[in-house]
Image (cartoon, helix red, strand yellow):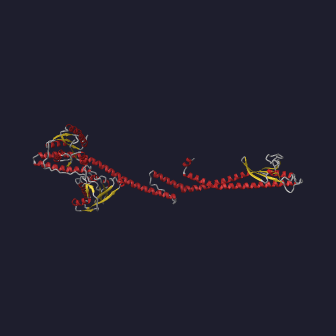
Amino acid sequence: MKKKLVCLSLASKLLILSAALIMGISVLFWYPSILHIQKEELGKNINFAESQMDVIERALYYGMLTNNREFIGQTIESLGTMDNILWIRIIDAEGAVRFSSTKGEFNVRTGSGWKGDVNTLPEKRLLAVKELKGQKDIEMVQPIHNMQPCYSAACHVHSADKRILGRIEYGYSLQSVDAYIRRQGYTMAAFGFVFIAVLSMPLYLIVDRFVLKPMSLLTEGMQKVTAGDLSHVIELDTKDELGMLASSYNSMTKQLQERNIAAAKELDEYRSSLLHAQKMEAIGTLSAGIAHDFNNILTGIIGYSELVREESDQPRIREYVGRVLELTDKASEFTKQILLIGRRVPPTRRPLDLNGLINDSMKMLRRMVEESIEIKVFQHSNLRKVDADQAQITQVLMNLVVNARDAMPKGGTIEIKTGEISIDEVYGKLHAYPKPGNYVFVAVSDTGSGIPQEIRDKIFEPFFTTKAKGKGTGLGLAVTYSIVKGHGGWIDLSTEVGKGTEFKVYLPTFSVLGNAGDVEAVSEKEPLPGGTESVLLVDDDVVIRDLGKSLLEGLGYKVFVASDGDEAVRIYKEQVGEIALVVMDRVMPKVDGVESFNRLKKISPGVKVIISSGYAADEAKKLRESGVMGFLDKPYRMAEMAKAVREAIDAGSGARRYS
């Protein structure tokens, strides 16, 4: 039953509740009315029965006084024929029936008499309402008193000493009363049903109009919210609680819709920045690989060019070779820019004051722009220092100023601003920024043409440029992006076509001073140091192997060569007592330089190794701690290699970097 009620609709439940409520109220009025009618009818019939008993009593005494038995019999027979009278008996003291409305009871003992004992006879009228076989009746017993002062035999058949001569028994049926009460109950029930039906219909209409329909609209609205539709609006022309609930629903969906739009916008920004970061990371990895191979080529060109210059006695050839070396120096700078894009050249971090750096760079920056361009500087007072590489940050500033200059060919204004900001964890996650903390920013803005929407996602890509051929390589912003990312910061772009552009660079405030090895330049005019020790040269590029072997053998060393790590380990194991130094490339197929170094240490813990690579410096600290003697940055000159080899062999411990 409970499950059936749960499954019913709200309208059905309200209708049932209303009917039950009305029925309960009706019963509260109906039941007392029935009881009152029952009591009233019972009282009427009792009064009627008692009045008949009085008639019988008077007829009995009159007959007794006149000794007229026929009058008594006629009276009883006459009353016995009336409706609802069940019996009338006159019984003497011995229990014998003297008169009866029922035929065949004359002079018959009833069995309920008093055996002649005067004291057992009732002295006053007794009345009782009894129920027998589902039917109610009234039973009365009236004592027959000896009438005074007539005690003579002439007027009475009894002796004078008998005070109670017998009794009158009277039975009266209440069946008609019960029938009447039932009829009254049915009538009232019928009126009650009509009342319920008549009252329920308008009640249902009122409930349906002001409760069920609003609830239905609210339910529909919640279902739409669950399905993700926040545009649905509930319209109710009421200001009651349901109207307030509908208003709250509309306000809630509006706020949720606004929050969803804002969240979707933030998510798009986050996704865009994440995709951009992934793309730049992939480009950086690719550019680093390209730079590695290009450095190998440059190393060979530089090395053989130096050999030609050293062995040639013709001034013109030596001049040509010198120009080749100048071009290779420019190409080397070009590869360093590519490595910056891949963040394979770690910054030499020191506490740096951006305000001071900007002030020191102003003369150089003003020379880089035309006279029609004005540079304004707005500096934040008491600016915190940043943990940065001064040369790289200077390059970032130069690149941004040059980019702003090129956006204003007819002149304009460049503004350089500094400031501070604090990033919390929630804001950082939503915008794909680095870890929370304090950051300093430098903003470079111009009043130029702005950046169109269709190319904004490409401006940090290497070699992308909108400048004419020969006017730029497209590496400026790519290098800027990579330097900033390498420092743990990020760049915000704000631009509007026709109104200008602002690049805002964020850098973390100073935390820990980075370790930086001293860079010692090697003069080309000094004689190249040599030796007679054995050196194992390991490189997967045959040009580098041949060049290095020629150089080292020319300096007096005995040279073993290997093309990969496996071959290097095998040769070193065979010549472990003879080889004084291993010069090994960082990136090689099969087994790279780091893994090969670890294997060599297992053979000889004191093995001396120099790592040669175009971007090994990013793990210099870690490799130095593990025992690497030094590093050769490709492309390198003959003098750099000669001095690095000699000092590594002579050194008992420690490490130096040659570049």
Furthest residue in direction top, as rendered: 574
Check the image and report above or below for 67 versus 530: below
Report the front residue among 103 and 82: 103
| Residue 206 position by quadrant | bottom right
Report the front residue among 258 and 138: 138
Q: x%, y% of residue 422?
A: 33, 57
Q: x%, y% of residue 381?
A: 28, 62
- Is residue 369 visible in the rendered structure shown here? no
Q: x%, y% of residue 504?
A: 30, 57
Q: How many marks?
A: 0
Q: x%, y% of residue 149?
A: 86, 57
- Is residue 31 visible in the rendered structure shown here? yes
Furthest residue in direction right, as rendered: 154
| Residue 307 position by quadrant | top left
Taking the spot 68% from the left edge, 53% from the top edge, the residue there is 187
Check the image and report above or below for 194 versus 544: below
* 177 lies left or right of 289: right
* 6 lies left or right of 178: left
Report the front residue among 409 and 115: 115
